[in-house]
Amino acid sequence: ALISMRQLLDYAAEHDFGMPAFNVNNMEQVHAIMQAADELDSPVIMQGSAGARSYAGEPFLRHLITAATEMYPHIPIVMHQDHGSEPAVCLRSIQSGFTSVMMDGSLMADMKTPSSFEYNVDVTKTVVDMAHAGGVSVEGELGCLGSLETGMMGEEDGHGSDDKLDTDQLLTDPDEAADFVKKTGVDALAIAIGTSHGAYKFTKPPTGEVLRIDRIREIHARLPNTHLVMHGSSSVPQEWLKIINEFGGDMGETYGVPVEEIVEGIKNGVRKVNIDTDLRMASTGAVRRHLAENPSNFDPRKFLKASTEAMAGICKARFEAFGSAGHA
Ligand code: G3H
Ligand code: 13P
Ligand code: NA
Ligand code: ZN
């Protein structure tokens, strides 16, 4: 059954676990997440980005997720809209049955230019008023996600901003976070604490802390009843990177957020952990390998099944590590 983000994350907070939130674009991703959740008895958050809506078409995206509720009636599912660029986008998702929406007012509607605090409060509050009237949850974002290493907003496709951000913009301020939640009433807040979107997060193998756990703890202390969200939380699995490159791919050396650090983040107040890149990599690696090893095959079901299995492996590992297994 579909439930709201607030219901699921309140439960997760009571029971001290974190929820991976996986981006979905196609049926294989939905299958992978649901097979893993079914096997481990975990609740599920599936989220669709603007890119997913334009790829699949909004009705297909929505029906893929509702199909999951029919096939797995015993598993609670949150249908979340990721990174809404303006209130109108969130309103359309609310009207079409999403149980949770993200208003990303940390950026202007072009999704490239950092916004002012006042603008962010204004657009987010507008969405909270509409969403809460219908029992839909809202995630806001304060601070700009970007690498503390390079000062850049990480967008793998090169469409991110070219302007270097300073550390102030790259880390969410605890006082501002408290003020933002008080003024908007969001259920969940995405915070900038050292992660960035996409596959190219860190150029060197992580040694020691890559996340600002101290900052998570400070924000959580100010906002014990607001669910903290960590975007850009892919771990960039080195085994899949190797397989991609072994079978004709060409990805550069890169590292993500170690799973153990995410677990540390969860212990210190993070409740929702956004993951997209890891499933993309597992899928690409599995398809490349399958096609290379089965050159005579022309039945897409065969290589897509390999993709589904590879993604399910990542999902199972995250449900286990974050502690949501056994909580469906
Ligand atoms: O936050 C970004 C997600 O990884 C979605 O990426 O816009 O390419 O669908 P996308
Ligand atoms: P990754 O690119 O690290 O998977 O982050 C995804 C995300 O934050 C979606 O909102
Ligand atoms: Na989101
Ligand atoms: Zn994100």
Image (cartoon, helix red, strand yellow):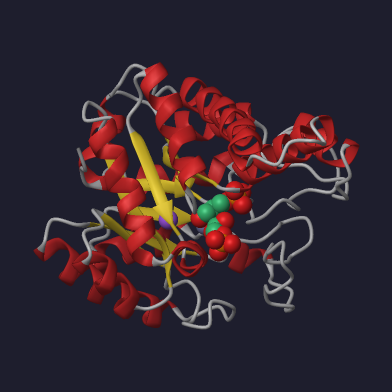
User: Splitting the image into 4 quarters, where does residue 258 fall?
Assistant: top right
Residue 221 in the image, given as x and y percentages of width and height: 37, 42
Looking at the rendering, the quadrant in which ligand 1 lies is: bottom right
- Is 164 on the left-hand or right-hand side of 10? right
In-image side of 16 versus 108 (left or right): left
Nearest the camera: 128 or 265? 128
Q: Looking at the figure, which quarter contains the C terminus?
A: top left
> Residue 223 in the image: x percent, y percent?
32, 48
Q: Residue at x 23, y 46 (%)?
A: 6
Location of residue 12 in the rendering, given as x and y in whole percent from the top left corner: 30, 31
272 relative position to 152: left or right = left
Residue at x 49%, y 82% (from the top left corner): 108
| Residue shown at 23% from the left, 37% from the top | 70
Q: Residue furthest left?
A: 133
Can residue 206 be seen in the rendering of this structure? no
Of 255 and 156, the residue lying toward us: 156
The x and y percentages for residue 46 are 39, 46
At a point 42% along the width and 77% down the height, the residue shown is 117
Query: Is residue 238 visible to us here?
Result: yes
Residue nearest the viewer, comparing 171 with 115:
115
Q: Which of the 4 image quadrants contains residue 95?
A: bottom left
Residue 237, compared with residue 140, is above or below; it is above
Quarter that holds the N terminus: top left
